[in-house]
Image (cartoon, grey):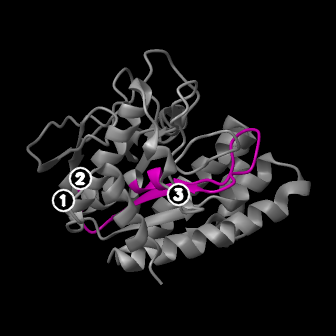
């Protein structure tokens, strides 16, 4: 029996009553530096990661490069376990659910921009085991609608849509593991770990495994831990949309910690994908940005 323990330790811990093959994934991009995954459970199955278009208050105005942390970790987990692929879910319907109709056009516009950017990214980096899927492509299907309605009676509207994603991807696309992100915290927070604990409560600890990367980095020291795939006015971010590495020129103690985060992204990229030109962190990230955005 394999169990995903989502209590005090936010990364996946596996235990078993019999011998099994376990992949130990290590990376400075992981929330706790390492995670364990069962090769037996993931072989020829799929992982998934979801990226959003808004915060609780506003629509994202771009796409941070930080999202590459999730992409690289998903690829690392896939390769280490023999998983068949990664489904990348673009959560467009989720954004429209929590924001008024007056900003739906903004959400749609950002969806189109990000879909084009991610398609280019996966092609240019040779990540051909990734399937890009918009949530709106499955949200209107009878199976999804039925699952969502049933879940809304148990956990409410907001949490039910995320769980419906997982149930449908599990049944229809052989997804058995999720890569997401979390902020380091000793106190319980309403974040991905909350959804995942509730999912395990409803469907069993063996139903899914979970991997957490570190949060994205805002060079503004007042709020340094942020989502790796959204950015809003007032943040100082390294971004793919629009392309900018200006934040890496920041100075100070907080900036150095954020610069190390991007140094870790560059290092993980070189380990998994290939070498970048010699140089400091900004030079490497500039080269990475050029590679991703190349036509």
Which image quadrant is residue 292 in? Answer: bottom left
Residues at marks 1 and 2 touching, judged by CB atoms closer than 8 Å = yes
Residue 25, visible in the rendered structure: yes
Left or right: residue 119 compared with residue 93: left
Residue name at image x 40 percent, y 80 percent: 123
Which residue, given by chain and number where applicable, does mark 2 sit on? 267
**Location of the N terminus (image quadrant):** top left
8 or 169: nearer the eye?
8
Decide whether residue 66 is among the magenta residues: yes
Residue name at image x 41 percent, y 50 percent: 179
Within 10 Å of the Cα at label 2, are there few (<14), some (14-19), or many (20+) other Cα atoms? some
Residues at marks 2 and 3 touching, judged by CB atoms closer than 8 Å = no
Which residue, given by chain and number where applicable, does mark 1 sit on? 271
Q: CA distance from mark 1 to mark 2?
A: 6 Å
Which portion, as a residue range, is magenta?
A: 41-68
Q: For the residues carrying marks 2 and 3, which lies nearer the camera in this image? A: 3
Indicate the secondary structure of the residue bearing disc 3. Answer: loop
Residue 9's place in the image compared with 163, above or below, is above
Residue name at image x 85 percent, y 56 percent: 103
Left or right: residue 186 compared with residue 146: left
Residue name at image x 47 percent, y 54 percent: 245
Q: Position of residue 233 (x, y in %)?
A: 71, 43
Residue 145's place in the image compared with 2, above or below, is below
Which residue, given by chain and number where applicable, does mark 3 sit on? 244
Q: Position of residue 10 (x, y in %)?
A: 37, 30
């Amino acid at each position: 029996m394999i169990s995903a323990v989502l209590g005090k330790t936010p990364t996946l811990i596996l235990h078993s009553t019999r011998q099994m093959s376990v992949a130990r994934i290590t990376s400075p991009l992981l929330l706790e530096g390492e995670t364990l995954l069962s090769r037996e459970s993931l072989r020829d199955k799929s992982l998934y990661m979801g990226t959003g278009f808004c915060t609780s208050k506003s629509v994202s105005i771009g796409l941070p490069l930080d999202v590459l942390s999730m992409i690289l970790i998903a690829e690392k987990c896939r390769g280490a376990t023999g998983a068949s692929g990664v489904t990348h879910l673009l959560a467009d319907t989720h954004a429209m659910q929590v924001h008024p109709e007056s900003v739906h056009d903004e959400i749609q516009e950002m969806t189109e921009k990000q879909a084009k950017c991610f398609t280019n990214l996966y092609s240019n980096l040779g990540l051909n085991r990734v399937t890009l899927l918009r949530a709106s492509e499955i949200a209107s299907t009878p199976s999804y609608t039925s699952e969502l309605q049933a879940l809304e009676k148990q956990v409410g509207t907001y949490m039910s849509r995320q769980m419906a994603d997982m149930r449908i991807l599990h049944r229809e696309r052989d997804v058995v593991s999720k890569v997401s992100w979390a902020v380091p915290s000793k106190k319980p927070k309403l974040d991905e770990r909350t959804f995942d604990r509730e999912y395990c409560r409803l469907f069993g600890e063996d139903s899914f495994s979970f991997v957490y990367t570190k949060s994205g980095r805002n060079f503004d020291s007042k709020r340094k831990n942020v989502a790796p795939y959204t950015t809003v006015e007032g943040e100082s971010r390294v971004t793919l949309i629009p392309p900018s590495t200006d934040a890496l020129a920041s100075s100070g103690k907080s900036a150095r910690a954020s610069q190390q985060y991007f140094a870790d992204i560059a290092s993980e990229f070189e380990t998994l994908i290939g070498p970048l030109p010699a140089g400091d962190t900004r030079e490497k990230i500039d080269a990475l940005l050029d590679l991703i955005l190349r036509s």
